[in-house]
Image (spheres, helix red, strand yellow):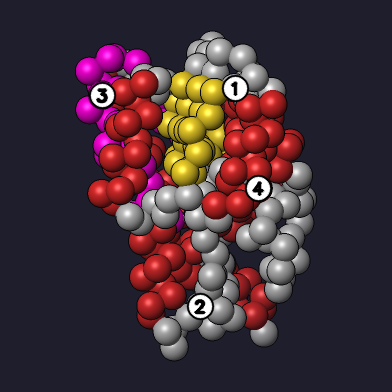
C-alpha cells in the first residue's frame, strides 16, 4: 500500500475535501489546500496545523489557470507532491437543467472538468519525472447515467471520470497511479438543499475513510456506497427505452 506525505486537495473548504484534509493531517505531512472561500479554507488549514501538519492554504479558484499553476508548482518546489486530489466542484443547475441559461452549464463544465485539468496539468510532468505519485479525480456515481435535473453536473462528472479512467493506463508506465472517485450522496454543501430524494446518504467522514483506503491501494475506481452503486448498475443494464421510461416516471 502507498503512503503519502505531500498532498494537494482542491475544494478543501468543506465536505469531502475538508474531511480528507483533516484525516491526512499529521506530523510530517505537508498539505496544499485550496477553496474559493478564504475564511473556510483557512479554518480547515488551522485545524490541520493543530494536528501537526505543514499547511499551505490558498483561496484560489481552479478555473484561474495561470495563478493556480504558479501556486501548485511553488508548493511542489518546497514539498514534492505524491498525492494530488482534484476534488473541487459545483452543482448549480436549476430545475430545468439550466437550458434557459447556458452560462450555468458552461460554468459547471469549466469548474468540474476544466478544474480537474488545471489541477493535474501543472504537476503531471514533475510526477512523471519522479516516477511516482497518485492522482485522485473526484467524479460521481451520477456520471454513469443521465439523471434528471442536473444535466451539466452529470456531464461534467462523466467527462472527469472517463478522462481519469483513460489516462490511468498511460500513466501506469510512468509509475503513477490514477483513481477515479465516484461518490453517491454525501453530506456536503452541494447536497444541503437538494430538491430530490438522496438514498443511502453518507457522511463526509465515512466517505473520506473509503477514499483514503482506495487511494492507498491504487484502486482504479472508488465508488460508494454499495446501495447507490447497485441502483446505478441496474439503471445501466436496462434497455435504453426502459431506462427512458423510468426517467420519465421520475420527472412526471
Tell me the quarter of the image containing the N terminus. Answer: top right
Measured in 3D between alpha carbons, the distance from the residue under mark 2 to the one under mark 1, in whole angstroms, is 41 Å
The kind of secondary structure element at disc 2 is loop
The kind of secondary structure element at disc 4 is helix
Report the residue marked by disc 4: 15
Q: Residue at x 60, y 36 (%)?
A: 45
Residues in magenta, as a range: 112-136
Mark before the other along the chain sequence, 3 or 2:
2
Image coordinates of residue 228 in percent, x first then y, are 68, 49
Main secondary structure along the magenta-highlighted residues: helix
Graded by Cα atoms within 10 Å as few (under 14), some (14 to 19) or many (20 or more), the crowding at tag 4 reads many
Residue 53 is marked as 1
Tell me the quarter of the image containing the C terminus. Answer: bottom right
The image quadrant that residue 164 belongs to is top left
Image coordinates of residue 215 in percent, x first then y, are 53, 25
Badge 2 vs badge 1, beta-carbon distance below 8 Å = no
Report the residue marked by disc 2: 97
Measured in 3D between alpha carbons, the distance from the residue under mark 4 to the one under mark 2, in whole angstroms, is 23 Å
- Left or right: residue 170 versus residue 85 is left
Q: Residue at x 28, y 40 (%)?
A: 70
Badge 4 vs badge 2, beta-carbon distance below 8 Å = no
Graded by Cα atoms within 10 Å as few (under 14), some (14 to 19) or many (20 or more), the crowding at tag 1 reads many
Mark before the other along the chain sequence, 4 or 3:
4
Report the residue marked by disc 3: 126
Q: Residue at x 65, y 35 (%)?
A: 46
Please, is residue 221 above or below residue 28 in the view? below
Mark before the other along the chain sequence, 4 or 1:
4
The image quadrant that residue 47 belongs to is top right
Measured in 3D between alpha carbons, the distance from the residue under mark 4 to the one under mark 3, in whole angstroms, is 29 Å
Amino acid at each position: 500500500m502507498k503512503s503519502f506525505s505531500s498532498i494537494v486537495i482542491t475544494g478543501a473548504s468543506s465536505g469531502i475535501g475538508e474531511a480528507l484534509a483533516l484525516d491526512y493531517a499529521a506530523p510530517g505531512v505537508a498539505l496544499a489546500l485550496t477553496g474559493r472561500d478564504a475564511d473556510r479554507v483557512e479554518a480547515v488549514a488551522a485545524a490541520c496545523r493543530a494536528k501537526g501538519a505543514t499547511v499551505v492554504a490558498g483561496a484560489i479558484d481552479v478555473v484561474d489557470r495561470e495563478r493556480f499553476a504558479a501556486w501548485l508548482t511553488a508548493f511542489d518546489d518546497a514539498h514534492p507532491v505524491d498525492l494530488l486530489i482534484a476534488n473541487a466542484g459545483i452543482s448549480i443547475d436549476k430545475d430545468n437543467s439550466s437550458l434557459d441559461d447556458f452560462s450555468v452549464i458552461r460554468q459547471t463544465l469549466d469548474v468540474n472538468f476544466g478544474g480537474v485539468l488545471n489541477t493535474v496539468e501543472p504537476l503531471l510532468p514533475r510526477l512523471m519525472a519522479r516516477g511516482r505519485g497518485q492522482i485522485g479525480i473526484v467524479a460521481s456515481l451520477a456520471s454513469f447515467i443521465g439523471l434528471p435535473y442536473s444535466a451539466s453536473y452529470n456531464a461534467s462528472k462523466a467527462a472527469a471520470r472517463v478522462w481519469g479512467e483513460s489516462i490511468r493506463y498511460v500513466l501506469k508506465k510512468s509509475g503513477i497511479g490514477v483513481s477515479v472517485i465516484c461518490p453517491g450522496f454525501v453530506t456536503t454543501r452541494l447536497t444541503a438543499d437538494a430538491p430530490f430524494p438522496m438514498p443511502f446518504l453518507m457522511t463526509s467522514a465515512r466517505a473520506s475513510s473509503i477514499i483514503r483506503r482506495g487511494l492507498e491501494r491504487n484502486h482504479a475506481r472508488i465508488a460508494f456506497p454499495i446501495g447507490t452503486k447497485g441502483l446505478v448498475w441496474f439503471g445501466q443494464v436496462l434497455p435504453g427505452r426502459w431506462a427512458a421510461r423510468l426517467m420519465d416516471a421520475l420527472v412526471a
